[in-house]
Image (tube, rainbow, N blue to C red):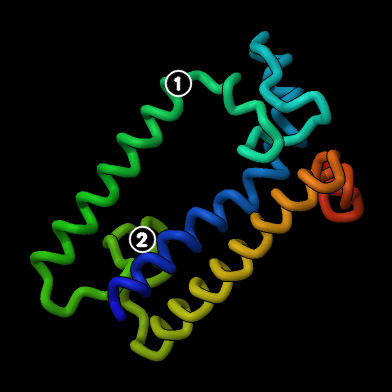
Amino acid sequence: LKQYREAELKHGRLAMLAAAGWPMSELLQPMISQFLKQPDLLTRGGEAPSILNGGLDQIPPFFFLAIIVFSGTVESVALKTRAIEVDYVPGDLGFDPLSLYTGKSEATKRDLQLKELNNGRLAMLAITWYAAAEFIGKSAVVDGTPFLFKSIL
């Protein structure tokens, strides 16, 4: 079961990053690209590039290569850590720069693990909703739910 927990944590962490990054890319990418004098990579409808929306052909191939190298590096560290440690905790890569986890009681650690797992599950649902809503509605997530995203800027 540890391998399944590890996979769920990895997917949840990626989904949490994506759940924050997807709407932020739709809100900030036009301004950033204009400031840097680079092409706007959003689709014609202002949606984030995805398999359903299209637009992935505009992303430089170097970006995808960098993502593959980064993911492979993180995965190799996880595999090495799992092979060395007998009492390995799934998802614990030893990266805690803010000391939110280290030095806490076992009950607090378990509580934080469950919160991360549940937030990851919610983020996976959110990303699925983002993709479906943009594909069906043919409009950006930030345009479909302005009360969530447009009010912060």
Tell me what residue is drawn at x 75 percent, y 23 percent. 31
Instruction: Tell whether label 1 touches label 2 (CB within 8 Å).
Output: no
Tell me what residue is drawn at x 65 percent, y 64 percent. 125
Q: Is residue 150 visible?
A: no
Residue at the extreme bottom: 107
Relative placement, left or right, of 105 versus 119 is: left
Work out whether 56 lies above or below 87: above
Element type at marker 2? Answer: loop
Which amino acid type is marked by label 2? Asp
Which amino acid type is marked by label 1? Pro
Q: Nearer the viewer, residue 91 or 4?
A: 4
Task: List the residue tagged with mark 2.
Answer: 96
Work out whether 34 lies above or below 77: above
Q: Position of residue 35 (x, y in %)?
A: 70, 15
Residue at the extreme left: 84
Q: CA distance from mark 2 to mark 1?
A: 31 Å
Q: How many marks?
A: 2
Q: Nearer the viewer, mark 2 or mark 1?
A: 1
Q: Quadrant of residue 23?
A: top right
Element type at marker 1? Answer: helix
Q: Is residue 19 visible?
A: yes
Q: Quadrant of residue 91?
A: bottom left
Q: Position of residue 148 (x, y in %)?
A: 84, 55
Q: Residues within 10 Å of mark 2 (few under 14, many from 20)?
A: few
Q: Residues within 10 Å of mark 1 (few under 14, many from 20)?
A: few
Q: Nearer the viewer, residue 81 or 108?
A: 81
Which tag, 2 or 1, sits closer to the chain's start? 1
The numbered mark at residue 61 is 1
The quarter of the rendered structure image containing the N terminus is: bottom left
Work out whether 110 lies above or below 76: below
Q: Nearer the viewer, residue 89 or 94?
A: 89
Q: Quadrant of residue 4?
A: bottom left
